[in-house]
């Protein structure tokens, strides 16, 4: 369970402004095994962060506990980013439309789209 100290620590680390022009975040398919690993790593990070906050000591990057938290966070990200992306509806539609247009061009003018893109003069035959 998340304590008030940990919650404050997490809120401070996410206080940066969000760039509205950034690429949208993709949803990932998280397997049960990956979800279990992410959950356990999160609990370990939470435990160590609580311990640091409760002691109230000054933190330095050379502190073993801070390094342990950084290692656990890196492992957590690694597990998460190994999970495959789920395509958005827009991405699926874009891929379908691209296949449809390539098929239509190939059928209508008998020209491969990739070769037309490499040599535009072939379109004026």
Image (cartoon, helix red, strand yellow):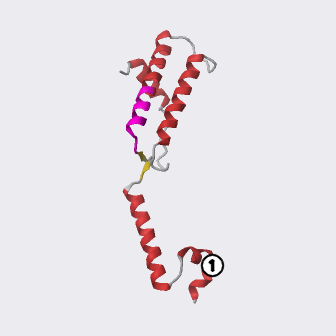
Front residue of this view, candidates 20 and 7: 7
Instruction: Name the spot of residue 2 as percent of width and height, x first.
Output: 37, 22
Say whether residue 58 is magenta. no
Instruction: Name the spot of residue 75 as percent of width and height, x first.
Output: 52, 31
Residue pictured at 39% horizontal, 54% vertical: 88
Q: How many marks?
A: 1
Residue pictured at 42% horizontal, 72% vertical: 100
Picture layout, residue 28 above or below residue 111: above
Residue matched to label 1: 119
Mark 1 element type:
loop
* Residue 10 occupies quadrant: top left
Asked if residue 66 lies left or right of residue 101, the reply is: right
Q: Quadrant of the N terminus?
A: top left
Q: Quadrant of the C terminus?
A: bottom right
Q: Which secondary structure dominates the residues rendered in magenta?
A: helix
Which residues make up the magenta segment? 29-40
Picture layout, residue 25 above or below residue 68: below
Residue pictured at 44% horizontal, 70% vertical: 99
The residue at the far front in this view is 33
Asked if residue 74 lies left or right of residue 94, the reply is: right
Picture layout, residue 79 above or below residue 106: above
Front residue of this view, candidates 123 and 20: 123
Front residue of this view, candidates 11 and 69: 69
């Amino acid at each position: 369970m998340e304590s008030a100290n940990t919650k404050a620590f997490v809120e401070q680390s996410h206080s940066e402004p969000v760039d509205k022009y950034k690429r949208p975040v993709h949803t990932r398919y998280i397997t049960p095994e990956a979800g279990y690993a992410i959950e356990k790593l999160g609990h370990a990070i939470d435990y160590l962060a609580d311990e640091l906050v409760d002691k109230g000591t000054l933190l330095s990057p050379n502190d073993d506990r801070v390094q342990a938290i950084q290692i656990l966070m890196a492992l957590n990200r690694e597990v998460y980013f190994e999970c495959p992306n789920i395509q958005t509806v827009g991405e699926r539609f874009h891929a379908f439309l691209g296949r449809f247009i390539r098929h239509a061009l190939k059928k209508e003018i008998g020209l491969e789209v990739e070769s037309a893109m490499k040599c535009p003069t072939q379109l004026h035959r």
